[in-house]
Amino acid sequence: MTSHRPSVRLPALLASAIAAALASPSLAAPNSAAAPATSEPVFPHYLLQDSQPATEPAKAVLLEVKVMEVKGSVMVSTDDGKTFKKAAVGETYNTGAVFRTGLRSAVTCRIGGEQMFTLESLSTVRVEEASRAGGKEKTDLMMKYGAASYGIEAAGREYDAVIRTPGSTMAIRGTVVRIYDRAGFSPQAESYTGRALFRTARGSTFIGGKSYSVASGIKGSAAETALANSTVDPSIAAARTQNESTVISQQLSSGGVLGFDNRASIPVIRGGGPLPDTSLPGALPGRLSFALRWDSQADLNFIVDNQAGDSTNIVLSGFRPEEILFPGYGLNVSTSGGLIPFDHRGGKNGGTEIAYWQNSFPQGVYGVGVLHATGGTTNFKINAFLDGEALPIFTFDAEGNVIRVNTLKGTIGPDGTDGAILFVPRNELFETIATPGDDEVTTQAIARSLAAIRTGGNTKSAPSLSKGFPSHPVVGPTNNQVTTLSKSASKQLKAGEARKAQKTR
């Protein structure tokens, strides 16, 4: 075997891997089946309020739980969740009743004479106990997930009122409190009036008093939470690293607005803009981090997928992603620890989406992709960093040559897709055979090449995700585009090799 043959074979294999990444199901139609099953993390925490034991034993009398207000889809079960029916105003229930709310729905119930609770959208709660013994009323609500508010309208009676999420408790007299606990986020408690004790795995802290206060299970005391929330942040239950909070704070300080999409189950940013090049490496959280940035009115979605193993062997046998990260719908967290912490819906100045692994991460081949969801044509950039150092990104130039760049740049329009691959850790073999590309020079060449590859049909919404979510569609190439992608890549590679052979004659 002559010495020059490996250098011809490996670029072709690398090019095939890039084509596979661009044509992978991740870009074609990200869906829940493409992502590994993830179990909902359990965050044990406690809301505990002052209570005084009854001085005399007394026979307990059951309290009625009366439905006072229903908004949207509210279901109730009296057989411990085996069967459900629609809840109606005026109905009364007792211990064991389970209430469940749907999208944009809520239910308010009165317990006894003075206690009220409101179960918010996409939440489930079970009335474990509602009774009165002597002069003391005891209430125990078990919230499986979601958000609920609780209040007592009158003082003068002794209360032992409880709201729990998997392993928690709450009780106080004459107060209004709220607890929030959704999968993937740190629990958070708010006190509007009165005083309560908030207990998490980190310890206990008092919240409340004469004014409103809030404490987070990830941030600690009410004072620590207030400091961390010095920028207005309406998504009250996000568990963030310090650098992750920095990214969000930069968006908010530049005019961004932060909210939460219950349908996609992810915090959402609108407005703000792209992070600047100079501050990007230091602003990104985690050891392994990725960033997608764009500069005009559009909503782009970031995709990061990976296949663990020896990167050279993966390229030789074909890149087949095993994990996918996508902003929302349960796909923004991977089993290996990857996370897309928020979905940037764009604005007049563009936006930023990030993905990262905090500590450990799969070693192998990664694909990075961008999907155009809504808006106009925009310029974009994709970067990757390992321990603060830029990782080379591999893609095609206009002639079908494999090149490496530190910043993948391009232009993407409605229904468009784009992508590339990279190696974690760096693969010196492929770095030596890939033509070094200047970021500025190759921008238009990459855009032309990938635009030419994707001429085989119109994009369409991915039904598994876009169904039921028309305001935020997910787009990807059709099967025709995937076929055309592979054929065009192969033709470009053969043409490139022919030109090289011609030059050597």
Image (cartoon, grey):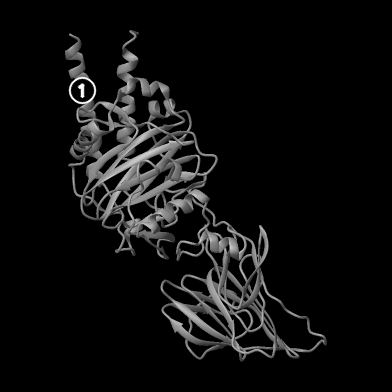
State the residue at coordinates (77%, 89%): 59
Could you tell whether 173 is left or right of 187 in the image? right
What residue sits right under mark 1 in the picture? 496
- Which sits in the foreground, 196 or 246? 246
How many labels sit on residues? 1
| Mark 1 crowdedness (10 Å alpha carbons): few <14, some 14-19, many ≥20 | some
State the residue at coordinates (54%, 64%): 226
Amino acid type shown at disc 1: Gly
On the image, the x and y values in percent for residue 274 come to 33, 49
Q: Which structural element holds mark 1?
A: helix
143 over 136 or under it: above or below: above
On the image, the x and y values in percent for residue 319 come to 38, 34
91 over 218 or under it: above or below: below
On the image, the x and y values in percent for residue 117 come to 56, 81
State the residue at coordinates (36%, 20%): 432
On the image, the x and y values in percent for residue 238 come to 50, 59
**Is there any visible trace of residue 2 in the rendered image?**
yes
